Image: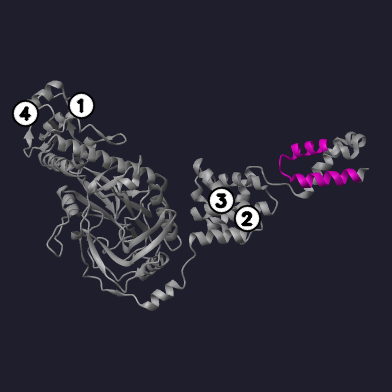
Amino acid sequence: MDYKKLGLKMGLEIHQQLNTEKKLFCPCKCELTDKKPDYKLLRYLRPTQSELGKIDRAAFEESRRKLKFIYESYDYETCLVESDDEPPHPLNMEALEIAMIIASILHMNIIDEFHTMRKQVIDGSNTGGFQRTGLVATDGYLETEYGIVKIENLCLEEDAARRISQKRGKVVFRLDRLGIPLLEVTTDPSIKHPEQVKEVAYQLGQVLRSTKVKRGLGTIRQDLNISIAEGARVEIKGVQDLDLMPKMVENEVKRQLNLIKIMKELQSREATVDNEIHNLNKIFKKTESKIISKALSNGGNVLAIKLGGFKGLIGKEVQPGRRFGTELAGYAKKMGVSGIFHIDELPAYGITDVDIERIADHLKLSEYDAFIIVADEDEKARNAIMEVQRRAKTSIKEVPEETRKALEDANSEYLRPLPTASRMYVETDIPTTVISKEQINDIKSNLPELPNEKKQRIIDQYKLSEDIASQLVRLDKVENFEDIMSTSKLDPTTVGSTLAYTLKELRRDGNDVSRLDNKMLKDTFALVEDGKIVKEAVSEVIVGLCNEEGSPEQIARSLNIIMLSEKEVEKIIDEILFENSKIVEERGMGAIGALMGKSMQKLQGKADGKLVNKLLRDKIQNIK
């Protein structure tokens, strides 16, 4: 695809948890727990008007789902601030300082006053119906292979509560994550190539990791904004795999191009969406469809809408393996139904040709007309069919602006409309924090080492290859490497390649490398340095440490790979020379080759070959 011709624009939002002593507005620790909750809270959330009297469209749609939210809380791990039963405490200044460090690295302009705002979010991810956030810096930049990318904003905000489960209109959240300091770094839409977005995400991740941020799964999250000239801005949330980003961009561009084709075809057909919602209960009174039968037996309804000129287009593919009907179904599912039926996929699911004919007669369908059916309890089915109706009307006019969820196959699915400015308003419970020029200058004069600087330094200092150095930086293993090298005289390449490659291979093979700490690795390398194991045996010891209890030396002994002392080796060589005295008499120094093989076979790799060769040579010379 010619992305330039298509007018592709992309921006990134990266959210990174900070590793501070306490949360952003309370004294609770920034740690997650799997303990049984001490108590649970029940809440319902609803949208409120902004200061201009407007309601955010995303918040309004969430409210229509009428979900019940259960919050798991604790006596010690959480407090009344998270449950919204106590006003927020003063701002965590450590978190603000880390945000200012990141802003300085990204060449941003730090503001002189930090104002906390309320961002309305009623998907249940917080107890108060809003997230506290504040702007720290603006107008930075990042240099990439494809050109400079502008960093628009850097905000400091509260992380959301942790979603535990969802079932039948009830969502369970845990409050342990709510309030952990979170940085939001936003670029402008100056990213123009799929590979560039991956590079920007990687570089920003490396900059963030140069400071006190949390590490591990779920501590950093990327959201991708994409648009093309004839399409619309779409936000794809939860893009975890950087390597998948280019494919996700490609699939989203294809989706919008296919939606544009469908839109133009609908316009050429002068397509219409009927406003009437039809009840089909009588038609399906004796249905063979289990889904519809279940809905009717539970007192629900079968509702349908007529789509003039849509026939044959609902089944069109818009993403790999996902059709236009899937797009429409996404809107219905957000209202709590399991899905929709449409004419392009029928007969199926127990809906027969006879049923289709009766529906067509009831709705007065012409050759190119289609229908969509939803079967569920009345209010849920009615809200769902109205959402499908709204989405179908939009499809005739434009590609809709949406927030979508990233899927593991590089596709995405509908989450909610894009939020608007109406969801932001001032937080009146927290005073303004003044940021002085002295604070900013002090931070800028003590910035941490950047990833590229770190890579070049360890190349120069330890004579590492660029490949190993790059991997150590990318995997955030430089500190581990230098800690080991501070007490070891081993070849840096041996230590570096173990951290950069061996651990990765062992993890891929199913070993729990998370059990390893730097002391274990230090003690393992010390075995090599002390001559107790050969360096080739390091991976065997590490595998043992991943799966068993014990010190590296205990593991090595259990594996029977501890090297023999020089005296032990000498004793074995004396025995071999005694057993093979005739060969020595006949060949003299020429016997070394044969005796070397016999010695190494008996020693089973527990002695260095150079030592064995030296002892044999010295002893045969003495015999002569």
What sort of colour scheme is used for the picture? Answer: one colour
Q: Tell me, yes or no, if residue 99 can be seen here.
A: yes
Q: Three-letter amino acid code at disc 4?
A: Lys
Residue 364: mark in rendering: 4
Q: Main secondary structure of the magenta part?
A: helix
Q: Which residue is mark 2?
A: 492
Q: Three-letter amino acid code at disc 1?
A: Tyr
Q: Secondary structure under badge 2?
A: helix
Q: CA distance from mark 2 to mark 3?
A: 13 Å
The numbered mark, 4 or 1, whose residue comes first in the sequence reads: 1
Q: CA distance from mark 4 to mark 1?
A: 23 Å
Q: Nearer the viewer, residue 522 or 304?
A: 304
Q: Secondary structure under badge 4?
A: loop
Q: CA distance from mark 4 to mark 2?
A: 79 Å
Q: Position of residue 437 (x, y in %)?
A: 37, 77
Q: CA distance from mark 3 to mark 4?
A: 68 Å
The numbered mark, 3 or 1, whose residue comes first in the sequence reads: 1
Q: Which residue is mark 1?
A: 349
Q: Nearer the viewer, residue 94 or 223?
A: 223
Q: Are marks 4 and 1 in contact (CB under 8 Å)?
A: no
Residue at image position (20%, 36%) is 339
Q: Which residues are magenta?
A: 593-621
On screen, 360 above or below 44? Answer: above
Residue 121: mark in rendering: none
Residue at the limit of the structure toward the front, as seen here: 5
- Quarter of the image with the N terminus in it: top left
Q: Is residue 118 magenta?
A: no
